Amino acid sequence: MYPDKKGYFLNFGGKFVPETLIVAINELETSYAYFKKSKEFRNKLNYYLKEYAGRPTPLYFAENFSKYLGFKIYLKREDLAHTGAHKINNTLGQVLMAKMMGKKRIIAETGAGQHGVATATAAALFKMPCCVYMGKEDMHRQSLNVFRMQLLGTEVKCVDSGSMTLKDAINEAIRDWVSNIDTTHYVIGSIVGPYPYPMIVRDFQCIIGKEVKKQILRHEKRLPDYLVACVGGGSNAMGLFHPFYRDKRVKFIGVEPAGRGLNTKEHGASLCKGTIGVFQGAKSYLLQDKNGQIQTAHSISAGLDYPGVGPEHAYYKDIKRAQYYAVDDKTTLLGFKFLSETEGIIPALEPSHAIGYLIKHKKRFKKLDIVILNLSGRGDKDIDIVKEHLV
Ligand SMILES: *Cc1c(COP(=O)(O)O)cnc(C)c1O
């Protein structure tokens, strides 16, 4: 079972970090191996996931949507978790672990602000000072999330280098970490970065798939035919997929952002259109030019606007365990509107890509198919963007 001891998912992953970070990365690896087995840690985390974050989240049979599509569709309601998305599963795990490791301070990066808010939330809960790096451009676009983090007692640091977005915020966070390694834990928000992060974040997000397995067996007395999720860095998708890895008849579909079109430069489809390279600590597919310069990603949803993808997805792509498709902004808006109107659930723009995929390609599925869609977050945060496009 991957990752192997060197942190590889077959050909992808690894830890491509400067020497100054190796000590911290190795400490994290050892600590995680310990806490993963610790009953005390697991009991505490389960307590907070249940009583604080509201888990298990429902697996809802979407009857109206199913009638329209012509097959059975269930929604895993991560939008109902505290703070409105799956990200809390990971931040509660990492911040609790940091606390038990004796760390004094939390840092994180954030793009749209969702991971920043989830980290700020966990930091407030576990009484840890917190500092979140955010690109200047993103701070403008997501000013409400900046204020949310501040309300939660977090310091938001403005990053005005490079494209002033997520990848630059990650670079700054790493710089901070290098200088404060003894006291500080860096909370990464997706299954990206150097080993052991892709494994740690995946393990914390696997609660999604583990719950789904129990729930679908209760509802249908059998496993589903398809699991469908949007892929940015890939944590909500892997959290759903991974517990079904050995269930070969369960097919995985990951949906990337095609933005303004896969033939333009304005998309974020690293798996569908990217090439192999090393970026932010790991080897994976990424959007780069001929000289290996990282390209700027685009998506209508800020949460998928990232030029790389978790190495485990690169592995799933190569061994064909999962299939990856891309859906453009327009189809995403269609999905957003459709779920709101048919089910009374306003989805985030990220999972609206997966919804759009099902609507557009419903003919690919059979009448008796059972499909589970990961509704990774709620749409309140996206109302302004959608208003610009739909009204
Ligand atoms: C951040 C985010 C994503 C994308 O991140 P993954 O690591 O790919 O899951 C998807 N959906 C929502 C609601 C998010 O906030």
Image: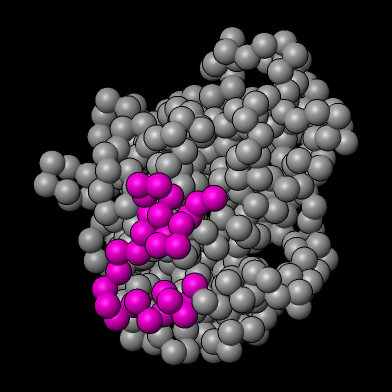
Is residue 124 or residue 148 the one in the foreground? 124
Tell me, yes or no, whether the highlighted magenta stretch contains residue 221: no
Q: Nearer the viewer, residue 225 or 81?
A: 225
Q: Residue at x 49, y 41 (%)?
A: 231
- How was this image coloured? one colour
Q: Residue at x 39, y 87 (%)?
A: 180
Residue 35 is situated, as x and y percent measured from the top left of the image, at 64, 75
Question: What count of labels does the image hold?
Answer: 0
- Residue at position x 35%, y 73% in the image: 174
Residue 222 image position (x, y, % from top left)? 80, 28
Seen as rendered, the residue at the extreme left is 291
Magenta range is 1-29
Q: Is residue 188 above or below residue 245?
A: below
201 or 131: nearer the viewer: 201
**Residue at (57%, 37%) from the top-left corner?**
229
Above-or-below relation of 73 to 10: above
Question: Is the residue 350 above or below the residue 20 in the image?
Answer: above
Q: Position of residue 76 (x, y in %)?
A: 72, 40
Residue 381 rendering spot, x and y as whole percentages: 58, 50
Residue 23 magenta-highlighted? yes
The quadrant where residue 42 appears: bottom right
Residue 185 visible, this angle: yes
The residue lying toward the viewer, choosing from 349 and 107, is: 107
- The answer to whether residue 308 is visible is no
